[in-house]
Amino acid sequence: MAVASSLRLPSLANLLSRSRPSTVLRRSTAGIRPRRSERGVYALSTAASTAETEDPRALLRKGSKGDDRSITPRSQDFSGWYLDVIEHAELADYGPVRGTMVIRPYGYAIWEAIQEYLNVKFKETGHSNMYFPQFIPYSFIEKEASHVEGFSPELALVTIGGGKELEEKLVVRPTSETIVNHMFTQWIHSHRDLPLMVNQWANVTRWEMRTKPFIRTLEFLWQEGHTAHATPEEAEQEALQMIDIYTKFAYEQAAIPVIPGRKSKVETFAGASRTYTIEAMMGDRKALQAGTSHNLGQNFSCAFGTQFTDENGQRQHVWQTSWAISTRFVGGIIMTHGDDSGLMLPPRLAPIQVVIVPIWKKDDEKSRVLSAALSVRDSLQSAGVKVKLDDSEQRTPGWKFNFWELKGVPLRIEIGPRDVSNGSVVVSRRDVPGKEGKVFGISMEPAILEAYVKDKLDEIQSSLLEKAKIFRDSNIVDVSSYDELKSAISEGKWARGSWCASDQDELRVKEETGATIRCFPFEQPKERRPCLMTGNPASEVALFAKSY
């Protein structure tokens, strides 16, 4: 397979080099492949160009005394913290090809929880799952002018197959609008064939030069929905319906208070008439585009000749939508809720909602404690709680406490000999650190414990959302002039102000501040104010922020 960008291979000297055992070279956020040494620390290949890195400086940090799971403080180095959490919580690792990642079982379990929720919602709204090939003829990409222009720099191309040069090069799927339209053209003939509404769960390849695990990688997982309709009104209703589903998912499942809205013309998806988005504020106050829904109008149907015969016998082009959420949402969960101890998972998406840690010192205590722990596990499982009993004997209870906190498990149940005698357990909340989050003397009686655990899981879900809302709202600044916008962005905040300026003015803001219009929120103020850039009357407020 030939690709649009070349790979850089480490030299023999780099392969044979050894890093100092007392320090760690920070994993690059630009997707440069780190190499694990015999001592479990990392060396960075010097073969990679610093021009391609997000931060060209090699960041060194001292390792904790004998602690191979130490995490960089979030406030000290947010990017370093993020990469530490992904590694030590066993969410993902770097693949052998620069810019790729291997999603480990725990990280994939979070993605599965996202899939399970969305699959139900998609089917409830009339969509069916199917699958399209990942190899797309290059001529398909060329048919829609803005589409090929938007995606050309990111394409991975196949030019050789079976040892022979291909007659036509193939694109490894960057998105599927083109191949979907090719097939829709064969399936849609009459108004009776509409609406046609499908979704696929697939992988996507985009040759990114600056990568970050889950947030931006050469290959990622996503769902992409594609629909065809007889009228523009139906297509618009569909696009808005799907962004509403994403918004509810973010709030109710991920506990992320996203802001839904419409993208500016400059930020609209290549080939779409309108793009709707949900924008999330991360812990470093950067914006994350967490999901999008596109009203494609007739752009692709005209390019591909996707037509139907209407009720009057006239041939018409279909009106279309596409919409997607990807594994970048996992990164959003990490960066929204995590703290210096590691992950903090919302209970509704947590692969493990409760971990049970049995504690004993003497052999004669072991059987009693384990028996009680097994009984608690079984009763919670029967109540539908996702529970893990950590009865391994290779690690101390204290190590287990720290490990499961790192992995973001919402609740921990501790059971020792005294607890068994009292018929009770100790329950600790992940979102409330220290003694404040620990409650003693909760009855082991199944009905009582099950109700208590479910109640606490609901409390944690609500608490995470409320905390994220407070953080978001305290970091959005209302501005009325360009100088105020620049000041807000320089302080790392989001700027909200009236806007009716030109595309050129929008690009100027991006060039001078690094911020872009994240969206025109659906929720708009009733009062109209002058545009912050031109002073002319503006009918809409826009949100500006730096983003991932």
Image (cartoon, rainbow, N blue to C red):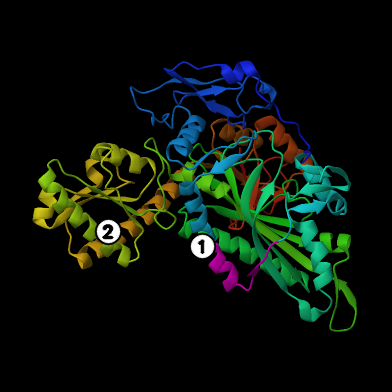
Q: Nearer the viewer, residue 485 or 28?
A: 28
Q: Image quadrant for the N terminus?
A: top right
Residue 120 in magenta stretch: yes
Q: Alpha carbon of mark 2 to alpha carbon of mark 1: how far? A: 24 Å
Query: On the image, numbered disc 1 is attached to which residue?
Result: 116
The x, y position of residue 356, in whole percent, is 27, 51
Could you tell whether 270 is left or right of 396 in the image?
A: right
* Highlighted magenta segment, given as a residue range: 117-131
Circle nearer the viewer, 2 or 1: 2
Q: Are marks 2 and 1 in contact (CB under 8 Å)?
A: no
Mark 2 or mark 1, earlier in chain: 1
Q: Is residue 273 visible?
A: no
Q: Is residue 71 visible?
A: yes
Most extreme residue toward the bottom is 312
Q: Nearer the viewer, residue 149 or 97?
A: 97
- The residue that appears at 60% across and 29% down in the rendered structure is 33
Q: Secondary structure at mark 1?
A: helix
Could you tell whether 194 is left or right of 340 in the image?
A: right
Q: Residues within 10 Å of mark 2 (few under 14, many from 20)?
A: many
Q: Image quadrant for the C terminus?
A: top right
Q: Is residue 448 above or below residue 485?
A: below
Q: Nearer the viewer, residue 283 or 420?
A: 420
The x, y position of residue 151, in whole percent, is 78, 45
The x, y position of residue 435, in whole percent, is 22, 42
Residue 318 placement: quadrant: bottom right
Residue 308 in magenta stretch: no
Query: On the image, numbered disc 2 is attached to which residue?
Result: 377
Q: In the drawing, what numbered circle is on residue 189?
A: none
Residue type beneath disc 1: Glu
Q: Is residue 209 above or below residue 444?
A: above
